[in-house]
Image (cartoon, helix red, strand yellow):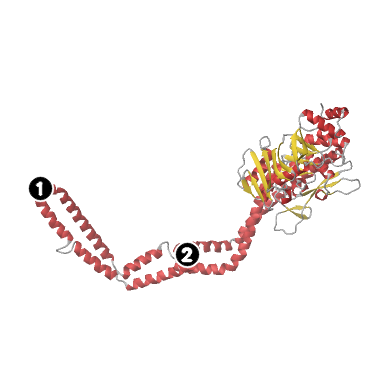
């Protein structure tokens, strides 16, 4: 619910705060006092158009803040939370919408202290508040909302969920089939190239790591003679020479053995010399074994160079490394195999799509039948409500129709000999039509002129859809234009009933409507020196009686008016 509205430097409002209540909130006041300015300010907070003319004369900027409480309205705030999630905005038990408009013509928007774009603010505002009367913020005048309202009235949420799952499954298969068909055409054009490239790779038939192994072997063979000389010399230094290190170590070991007999402290040094002798001999043996593997085969070197060159060309052509060459071979094999098996794969997907499409058609027909049945009940309910609200000859029609298509590759259903488009919610397009005068054909609701008449149509719709409509706050600005007496009493009763499911805020000048209020606010114009300002205050029970009496008899309140006011309030 809208818990608090704070307005600063907006039009003739200097600064005021209104704390609204649950149920039916009625706002009254003299003409020109600024009642509708409150609605204009709220419109600004929920994303409607802003301009610098809204700013109070002498001020730098106008500020409007609207605070909504989620408690007790959790189900109705489900759509709002999805918008918060999409835009990564934190959402707690309160939602604070803030709008600032400066004299420079700039506008800043905030949601829970996070700066957002006007479009995000409006997306949230659309879910929180519905304005009716002299304003454009009317969800029921948006054609795209009509199907949603009818479906909520028909209570077909489970059917729609099941259909939606089948629809998106069918569309996924269809997209896969289309992509495969496109790929088939492209691959067939490239098949000769693929086969040529694969033959190039298979002719060489490189193995994993072969390029590095070849490089190592070629380097070894190319330097074989030098390596042989060096290893021979090293072997002699370590072992095969009268002055070799191993010979000198053994002589040292003999000297240590003699020293050991004279002094045992040489035992550790003796161990180290023995270990060093063993290490030198092992190193000499390793060098000897390596030297024995050396070859001087020029023919073998040439063969290896040719092989390395072939692999190098493949690497340059297919990605730069042997890994990319091998990956390319696998890819080419798969693509060629795919071309050869396209027809089988496409037939398989066509069969799967056909089954999913038929299931979609079946579920869409079931949904359409329930919509048709629900639409008849909705039409009667709204026409009955219109009569109570003074539109005696009102006709309301929910028109359900389909979009014929001629492209057999799309998701479709068959109705008779026609093919109609399937959408994520079935194959029905829905629009509300209305006629308010005898003899006139119903016209699209979105084309009906604004004013008191359209407000009553909105009230009838809202009353009929009260449980289905998830918008938590409904505002009616001057819904009583052109009505009085019994009709005004019916409008007040309808607003009261509507407030059982929503928080309702209504601006009115009729006592019959005001008498139904749960909370009554009066707007007053105050002159302070050379400036005029608007103020608002909540009335006590006694003040309400007087205010209603004023609405009935004018500024001079009579005893009869007071008595009638109490009767209207059921006092």
Select label 1 or label 2 by which is in front: 1
Left or right of 208 on screen, residue 64: right
Q: How crowded is mark 2: few (under 14 residues within 10 Å), some or many (20 or more)?
A: many
Residue 385 percent location from the top left of the image: 84, 38
**Mark 2 or mark 1, which is nearer the start of the sequence?**
1
Q: SS class of the residue under badge 2?
A: helix
Q: SS class of the residue under badge 1?
A: loop
Residue 500 visible from this viewpoint: no
Q: Nearer the viewer, residue 106 or 530?
A: 530
What separation in Å lies between label 1 and label 2 (alpha carbons)? 70 Å
Residue 255 visible from this viewpoint: yes
Residue 25 percent location from the top left of the image: 76, 35
Residue 106 percent location from the top left of the image: 67, 52
Left or right of 331 on screen, residue 160: right
Task: Report which residue position mark 2 lands on.
Answer: 325
Quadrant showing the C terminus: top right
> Quadrant of residue 125 in the image?
top right
Residue at the image position 86 percent from the left and 48 percent from the top: 442
Task: Report which residue position mark 1 lands on.
Answer: 263
Residue at the image position 8 percent from the left and 48 percent from the top: 262
Residue at the image position 22 percent from the left and 60 percent from the top: 284
Outermost residue on the front side: it is 529
């Amino acid at each position: 619910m809208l818990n608090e509205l704070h307005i600063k430097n907006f039009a003739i409002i200097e600064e005021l705060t209104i704390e609204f209540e649950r149920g039916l909130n009625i706002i009254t006041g003299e003409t020109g006092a600024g009642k509708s300015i409150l609605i204009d300010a709220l419109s600004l907070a929920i994303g409607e158009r802003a301009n610098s003319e809204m700013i109070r004369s002498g001020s730098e900027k106008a500020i409007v803040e609207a605070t909504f409480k989620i408690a007790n309205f959790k189900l109705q705030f489900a759509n709002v939370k999805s918008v918060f999630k999409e835009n990564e905005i934190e959402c707690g038990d309160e939602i604070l919408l803030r709008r600032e408009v400066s004299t420079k013509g700039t506008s800043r928007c905030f949601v829970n202290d996070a700066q957002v774009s006007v479009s995000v603010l409006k997306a949230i505002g659309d879910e929180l508040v519905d304005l009716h009367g002299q304003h454009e913020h009317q969800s029921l005048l948006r054609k795209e909302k009509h199907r949603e309202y009818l479906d909520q009235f028909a209570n077909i949420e489970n059917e729609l969920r099941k259909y939606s799952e089948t629809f998106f499954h069918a569309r996924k298969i269809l997209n896969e089939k289309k992509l495969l068909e496109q790929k088939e055409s492209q691959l067939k054009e490239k098949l000769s190239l693929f086969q040529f490239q694969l033959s190039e790779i298979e002719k060489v038939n490189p193995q994993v790591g072969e390029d590095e192994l070849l490089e190592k072997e070629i380097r070894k063979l190319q330097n074989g003679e030098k390596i042989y000389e060096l290893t021979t010399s090293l072997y002699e230094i370590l072992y095969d020479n009268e002055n070799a290190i191993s010979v000198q170590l053994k002589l040292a070991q003999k000297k240590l053995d003699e020293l050991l007999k004279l002094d045992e402290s040489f035992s550790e040094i003796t161990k180290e010399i023995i270990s060093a002798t063993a290490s030198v001999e092992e190193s000499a043996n390793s060098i000897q074994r390596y030297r024995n593997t050396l070859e001087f085969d020029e023919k073998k070197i040439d063969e290896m160079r040719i092989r390395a060159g072939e692999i190098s060309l493949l690497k340059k052509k297919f990605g730069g490394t042997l890994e990319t060459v091998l990956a390319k071979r696998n890819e080419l094999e798969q693509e060629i195999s795919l071309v050869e098996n396209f027809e089988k794969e496409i037939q398989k997907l066509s069969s799967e799509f056909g089954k999913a499409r038929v299931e979609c058609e079946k579920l869409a027909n079931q949904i359409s039948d329930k919509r048709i049945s629900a639409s008849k009940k909705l039409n009667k309910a709204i026409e009955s409500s219109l009569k109570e609200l003074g539109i005696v000859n009102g006709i309301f029609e929910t028109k359900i129709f389909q979009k014929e298509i001629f492209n057999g590759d799309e998701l479709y259903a068959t109705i008779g000999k026609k093919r109609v488009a399937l959408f994520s919610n079935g194959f029905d397009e829905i629009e509300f039509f209305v006629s308010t005068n005898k003899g006139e054909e119903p016209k699209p609701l979105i084309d009906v002129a604004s004013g008191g008449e359209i407000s009553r149509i909105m009230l009838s719709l809202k009353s009929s859809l009260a449980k289905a409509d998830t918008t938590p706050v409904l505002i009616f600005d001057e819904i009583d234009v052109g009505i009085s007496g019994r009709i005004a009493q019916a409008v007040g009763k309808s607003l009261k009933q509507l407030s059982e499911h929503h928080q309702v805020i209504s601006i009115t000048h009729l006592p019959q409507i005001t008498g139904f209020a749960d909370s009554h606010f009066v707007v007053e114009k105050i002159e302070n020196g050379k400036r005029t300002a608007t103020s608002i205050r909540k009335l006590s029970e006694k003040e309400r009686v007087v205010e209603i009496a004023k609405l009935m008899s004018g500024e001079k309140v009579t005893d009869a008016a007071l008595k009638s006011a109490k009767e209207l309030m059921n006092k």
